[in-house]
């Protein structure tokens, strides 16, 4: 496996690869790693025994948070992130950005990435954590439930486990979307476009993070019927209970602000998900679930204001010491 210099610069490398799904389709994904020996910003942390974490981004997104990578490295973990097919570094000109017809279509590339991480030091036992944000959190939870015994800890950052309001909203949406998804899965749904979350994080607007608009468009990728149907089906699986038997941490904002017009509250709340619904639905994931609600947090908790994400990192550190270090 050959690593290439990554778009994030010094200390980061990436490797594009292909994985064949259960449906026989070959898809391209990109594994990103943080190599602190080449990054003068952070000395290498001791890694004995071997521990690693694999991060899955949200929908219409990609991995860019170098601070998060350095945090995990400082905790003694090798850090990896996966730009899943049709996202970020894995985008191809002839495909629909962000599109997937079944969340299980990510399984092959996640499994391949896990295999590559393990193979880097095949003689050393590996304790692997997985971290997912938003839709990536839903994907991570479903993958872990289908692949017991592979992951030791699961960290979910504002995972999209349920629709706004309640499961009744999800069921109503399913009734409307499913017929179209069967007949025309790639049909674009005409939904209100909202760039409020992007406005709160991008340095091109009022945030502090440098984003590539090609990889993380301000208005997100078009919402297609097949994709929404896949998400609703995944959420229905969570609602039935996943029975995950490893420690799970769910980090969410203390409050949501989901209006159709901009509000200053969107600078310190989740402008995407209903966090109260997510907090309740998180209990369906498994037997050991910790929920941390972060005052002032955005939809991606680790893109919030400096003092807010410092609080989130403290809480994550405490959880790691309680579960991963043990």
Image: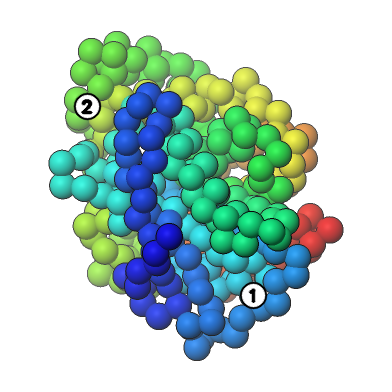
Q: Position of residue 199 (x, y in %)?
A: 31, 60
Residue at 71%, 28% in the rendered image: 243
- Say left or right for 205 vs 143: left
Mark 2: secondary structure: loop
Establish if 165 lies above or below 275.
Answer: above
Residue at 43%, 60% in the rendered image: 1
The residue closer to the viewer here, 4 or 94, is 4
- Say left or right for 190 vs 21: left
Dots 2, 1 in contact, CB < 8 A: no
| Mark 2 closeness class: few <14, some 14–19, many ≥20 residues within 10 Å | some
Q: Alpha-carbon distance for marks 2 and 1? A: 42 Å
Establish if 298 lies above or below 143.
Answer: below
Residue at 44%, 42% in the rendered image: 109
The residue closer to the viewer here, 54 or 189, is 54
Establish if 252 lies above or below 319.
Answer: above
**Residue that carries the numbered disc 2 in the rendered image:** 186
The residue closer to the viewer here, 197 or 160, is 160
**Residue that carries the numbered disc 1 in the rendered image:** 74
Q: Residue furthest front?
A: 123
Mark 1: secondary structure: helix
- Say left or right for 4 vs 47: left
């Amino acid at each position: 496996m050959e690593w290439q210099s990554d778009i994030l610069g010094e200390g980061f490398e990436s490797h594009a690869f292909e994985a064949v799904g259960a449906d026989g389709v070959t898809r391209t994904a990109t594994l990103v790693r943080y190599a602190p020996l080449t990054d003068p910003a952070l000395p290498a942390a001791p890694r004995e025994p071997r521990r690693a974490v694999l991060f899955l981004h949200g929908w219409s997104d990609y991995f860019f948070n170098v601070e998060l990578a350095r945090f995990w490295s400082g905790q003694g973990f090798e850090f990896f992130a996966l730009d899943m097919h049709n996202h970020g570094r894995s985008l191809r000109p002839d495909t629909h950005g962000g599109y997937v017809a079944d969340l299980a279509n990510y399984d092959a590339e996640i499994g391949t990435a896990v295999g590559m991480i393990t193979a880097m030091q095949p003689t050393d036992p590996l304790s692997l954590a997985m971290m997912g944000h938003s839709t990536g959190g839903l994907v991570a939870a479903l993958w872990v439930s289908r692949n017991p015994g592979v992951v030791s800890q699961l960290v979910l950052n504002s995972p999209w486990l349920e629709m706004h309001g309640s499961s009744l909203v999800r069921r109503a949406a399913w009734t409307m979307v499913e017929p179209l998804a069967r007949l025309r899965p790639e049909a674009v749904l005409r939904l209100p476009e909202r760039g409020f979350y992007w406005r709160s994080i991008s340095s091109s607007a009022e945030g502090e993070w440098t984003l590539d608009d090609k990889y993380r468009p301000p208005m997100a990728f078009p919402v297609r019927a097949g994709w929404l149907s896949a998400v609703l089906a995944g959420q229905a699986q969570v609602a039935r209970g996943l029975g995950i038997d490893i420690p799970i941490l769910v980090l969410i904002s203390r409050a949501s602000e989901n209006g159709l017009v901009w509000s200053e509250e969107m600078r310190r709340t989740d402008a995407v998900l209903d966090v109260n619904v997510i907090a309740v639905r998180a209990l369906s994931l498994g037997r050991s679930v910790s929920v941390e609600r972060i005052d002032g947090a955005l939809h991606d908790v680790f893109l919030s204001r400096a003092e807010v994400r410092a609080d989130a990192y403290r809480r994550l550190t405490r959880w790691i010491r309680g579960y991963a270090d043990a």
